[in-house]
Image: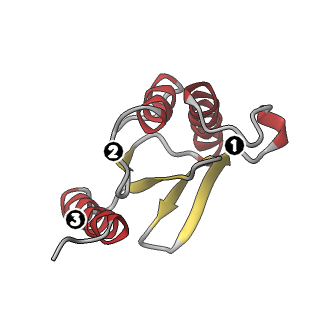
């Protein structure tokens, strides 16, 4: 029987996260969530269970409220990189979850790299 899109997404998310967790022990995780209307990203320290920095297209200061396009994703990535510097984070690993690495997710990653994050 065929799996639903949601089941396939959840399987892909667990596969990606478990592989990354085994390879990048001790590093901060850059987690991305994308919906139809918004995109958000967080820098998470899994050892302590705290979020160090976050950025979202829901923030009015970025000027892209309610948009989920490549420009909005790039602004979120740049804002996250700036906040990561303030939090003292330079290296992380990129957890795309179950989302494919293209479009907005790729734009966010590229903007974060240009902002100074290394992954």
Q: Is residue 33 left or right of residue 65?
A: left
Image depth: mark 2 or mark 1 in front: 2
- Residue at 37% across / 50% down in the picture? 99
Q: Disc 2 marks which residue?
A: 100
Q: Disc 1 marks which residue?
A: 57
The answer to which quarter of the image holds residue 68 is top right
Label 3 and label 2: CA atoms lie apart by 13 Å
Classify mark 3: residues with Cα within 10 Å, few (<14), some (14-19) or many (20+): few
Label 3 and label 1: CA atoms lie apart by 27 Å
Q: Earlier in the sequence, mark 3 or mark 2?
A: 3
Asked whether 62 or 2 is in front, the reply is 2
Q: Disc 3 marks which residue?
A: 15
Label 2 and label 1: CA atoms lie apart by 19 Å
Classify mark 2: residues with Cα within 10 Å, few (<14), some (14-19) or many (20+): few
- In the structure shown, which secondary structural element does the residue marked by tag 1 occupy? loop
Q: Is residue 114 left or right of residue 93?
A: right
- In the structure shown, which secondary structural element does the residue marked by tag 2 occupy? loop
Q: Residue furthest front?
A: 1
């Amino acid at each position: 029987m065929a799996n639903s899109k949601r089941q396939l997404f959840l399987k892909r998310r667990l596969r990606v996260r478990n592989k990354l967790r085994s390879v990048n022990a001790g590093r901060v995780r850059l987690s991305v969530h994308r919906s139809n209307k918004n995109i958000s990203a967080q820098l998470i320290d899994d050892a302590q269970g705290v979020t160090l920095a976050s950025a979202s297209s829901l923030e009015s200061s970025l000027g892209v409220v309610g948009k989920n396009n490549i420009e909005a994703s790039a602004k979120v990535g740049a804002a996250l990189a700036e906040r990561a510097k303030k939090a003292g984070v330079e290296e992380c690993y990129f957890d795309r979850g179950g989302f494919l690495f293209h479009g907005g997710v790729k734009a966010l990653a590229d903007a974060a790299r240009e902002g100074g994050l290394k992954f």
